[in-house]
Amino acid sequence: MPSVAMSEGAPAPIGLGTKLVLAGTSCMCGQSVANPMDVMKIRLQIQGLAVAEGAQPKYTGMLSGLGTIVREEGVAGLYKGIKPALLREGSYSALRMGLYEPIKELLGATDPANTPLWLKICAGGSAGALGGAIANPADLIKVRMQGDLATPGQAPRYPGLFAAFRMIAAEEGVANGLYRGVGPTASRGMLLTAAQLPAYDHIKHTLINIDVLPEGKPLHFVSSFAAGFIAVGVTNPVDVVKTRIMNQQVCPETKVGLTYKSPIDCLAKVVRSEGVAGLYRGFWPSWLRLGPHTVVTFLVMEQLRALVGMRAI
């Protein structure tokens, strides 16, 4: 992408709708790069339950797992769930990223270069929880489609994105189906955004303030790389719980999960059967997914903001 000079002085007034569109577009670009590692992360997190019950692991590592997926499902297997993943980014991530600055300003932020870290964390957590709760159906369908082990020639769990919406709503309902796992999803959104956006924001302005790097792409890269690593460390345990709950089989009569009754029940069972390390299953695929996703997202977002006359984050 060609370099765009960052806007100086007072920014042009930009509406909330534009901020949400820019955020959603940036995150969709990030997801397009990161989807293969997202699929691998989901498969490793789901596999943990089977291994705990005595089954042999199908995926023995990250690189070998990617090879297994390509061998059995083709390259298209790495892009399973891309449609709901992009829908999720265009809804959930648009809200959590696009609402961060408006909420930060509501909490009293007036100077982006000297805003307290605690205020940034509060703004990020609020935006992330709201986005996660609203967009839970897209996240649920993404997890299920990416976790689908159907190989070419086998019928997939869901034939398509909109069919998945219809089938889940009809078979499991809205509250117990499409909004299954909304608690862990909102919690993960809260933790992710409270870690990722404030980390990027704070690291970036700290580097500017101490004259290490000026505003520009190198600064955006360094800040987003660090923010991605911090975000994975904070969110991986919640991500494991969310993935297990969303992907478990459900009793047709009661609509209750057959393995986990609640997020706390899931957390306890994972720790009891797999140890604390079980909460960090898929950490490196998560990092290789969220790291590039974060870098691409912020690089694209900063350029788009400059194009429409907004100041840098």
Image (cartoon, grey):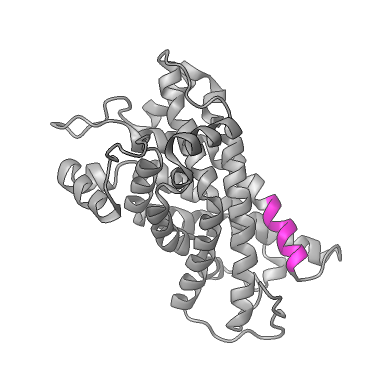
Quick one: which residue is furthest to the left in this view?
Answer: 253
The x, y position of residue 107, in whole percent, is 54, 66
Give the residue drawn at x 80%, y 61%. 207
Q: Nearer the viewer, residue 270 or 286?
A: 286
Q: Nearer the viewer, residue 287 or 35?
A: 35
Quarter of the figure with residue 296: bottom right
Q: Nearer the viewer, residue 170 or 131?
A: 170
Q: Is residue 102 shown in magenta?
A: no
**Location of residue 36 with respect to 298 vertically, above or below:** above
Give the residue drawn at x 61%, y 81%. 307
Q: Going by the image, does 48 lie left or right of 202?
A: left
Quarter of the figure with residue 248: top left
Q: Going by the image, does 225 lie left or right of 279?
A: right
The x, y position of residue 122, in whole percent, is 55, 56
Quick one: which residue is furthest to the right in this view?
Answer: 211
Q: Going by the image, does 295 lie left or right of 264?
A: right
Give the residue drawn at x 52%, y 82%. 14
Can residue 54 be seen at all in this image of the molecule? yes
The x, y position of residue 82, in whole percent, is 42, 53
**Location of residue 20 with respect to 30 vertically, above or below:** below
- Report the span colored magenta: 217-226
Can residue 238 be seen at all in this image of the molecule? no
The secondary structure that most of the magenta stretch takes on is helix
Position of the C terminus, as image quadrant, is bottom right
The x, y position of residue 205, in whole percent, is 74, 64
Number of numbered markers = 0
